[in-house]
Image: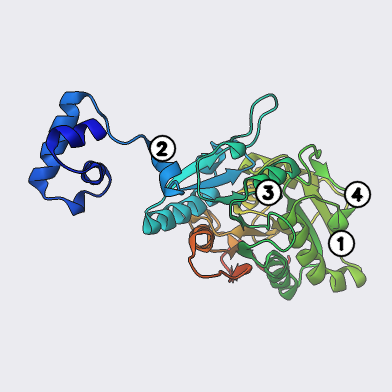
Amino acid sequence: MSDLARSLGVSQATISNAFNRPDQLSPQLREKILAAAREAGYPGPDPLANTFRRGRTGAVGLIVHEPLQYLFEDVAAQLTMAGVARACGEHGSSLVLVPRAEPGRPDVVSAALVDGFVAFCDPLEPARRELLQARRLPVVGLDAPVAEGQPYVGIDDRAAARMAADHLVALGHRRFGVITFPLAPDSRPGLVAAGLAAPTRYVANRARLAGYRDALAPVVHDGGTVAVAVAAGVEESHGAEAAASLFETPDPPSAILAMSDRLALGAVTAAAERGINVPGQLSVVGFDDIPAAATSTPALTTVRQPHADKGAEAIRMLLAEAPAPTVLLLDTTIVVRTSTGPPA
């Protein structure tokens, strides 16, 4: 940069502006500088050196605890990512994807060149929490706080789950099945003896089970039944497998509450394979309101949550110049479609 400035008779700052702030120069002068740089084989200021000089990178890190392909294969995650990307664009920030840590490899959290992190994790692993504390960068949780008292953006999962169960109770159902996400990294799929009191390390799971329990407790007290099945994963096939285990119980459910639309759609498929009519013989309620919920047959009753808005608000909270709220909970609603009706 110094050599170019000397040869062209301009300041070093002018050379820097040609690459970093082109609006500060006339088009003719900028083209003259860039042509001289190309001839000299100079590609422009070193990005890493610029980071140290400015004290910021212009990038945000998105930490996930799933394989990276999850962000592009799961529909709810895609919608969240769209909101993250939109807010990054508003602030002129780049986005660095930080995948889950793999055994024997350095954790990208410790070396990512970013100005802060959004943790799309539930929960964040203790080792990563320590790395973040050591880096002293701002962190915002997405769906769950990184640690007690830390800022995060999410929904009231307990109230949303209670809303879904209340809908089925109001229709008159008394025999319920619940399909939950895995309760722990090593949890086994299938029926869980502890039912709605099943312990889980995941914040959203725990809150949704509590919400279902809030709404169904009076029904159970009056002789109703609730069976809980743990899904092996988050795909439709996992929902179908969990529903199959519910259908095989001595008192099979007349209504199923699933923790996601994909699991719920799997339950509808499993019912159809057994000749169980939805909603004539079985009502199914999902969670998320992904696009497929409205177009499925029957159309899926579900809890609508603002995925894209959650992602966008997490980025805005992270990059806000003024102090941001510690917790931002966005609204959810129940969307009633044709997958639910009174019990037969």
Residue at mark 2: 49
What amino acid type is highlighted by mark number 4? Ala
> Which of labels 1 and 3 is toward the front?
3
What amino acid type is highlighted by mark number 3? Gln
Residue 225 image label: 1
Q: Are marks 3 and 4 in contact (CB under 8 Å)?
A: no
Q: Could you tell me how far apart the alpha carbons at marks 2 and 4 are, in whole angstroms?
A: 58 Å
From the viewer's perspective, tell me whether residue 268 is left or right of residue 81. Answer: right
Residue drawn at (18%, 34%), measured in percent from left and top? 6
Q: Quadrant of the C terminus?
A: bottom right
Q: Position of residue 183 (x, y in %)?
A: 78, 47
Q: Position of residue 308 (x, y in %)?
A: 49, 58
Q: Residues within 10 Å of mark 1 (few under 14, many from 20)?
A: some
Residue drawn at (54%, 36%), measured in percent from left and top? 69
- Name the N-terminal-most of marks 1 and 3: 3
Residue at mark 3: 133
**Helix, strand or loop status at disc 2:** helix
What amino acid type is highlighted by mark number 2? Ala
From the viewer's perspective, tell me whether residue 27 is left or right of residue 51. Answer: left
* Residue 138, above or below 10: below
Q: Are marks 1 and 3 in contact (CB under 8 Å)?
A: no
Q: Position of residue 161 (x, y in %)?
A: 70, 65
Residue 186 image label: none
Q: Residues within 10 Å of mark 4 (few under 14, many from 20)?
A: few
Quarter location, residue 203: bottom right
Using the image as rendered, state which of residue 95 and residue 154 is in the foreground.
Answer: 95
Say whether residue 73 is visible: no
Q: Could you tell me how far apart the alpha carbons at marks 1 and 3 are, in whole angstroms?
A: 45 Å
What amino acid type is highlighted by mark number 1? Thr
**Helix, strand or loop status at disc 1:** strand
Q: Position of residue 169 (x, y in %)?
A: 75, 72
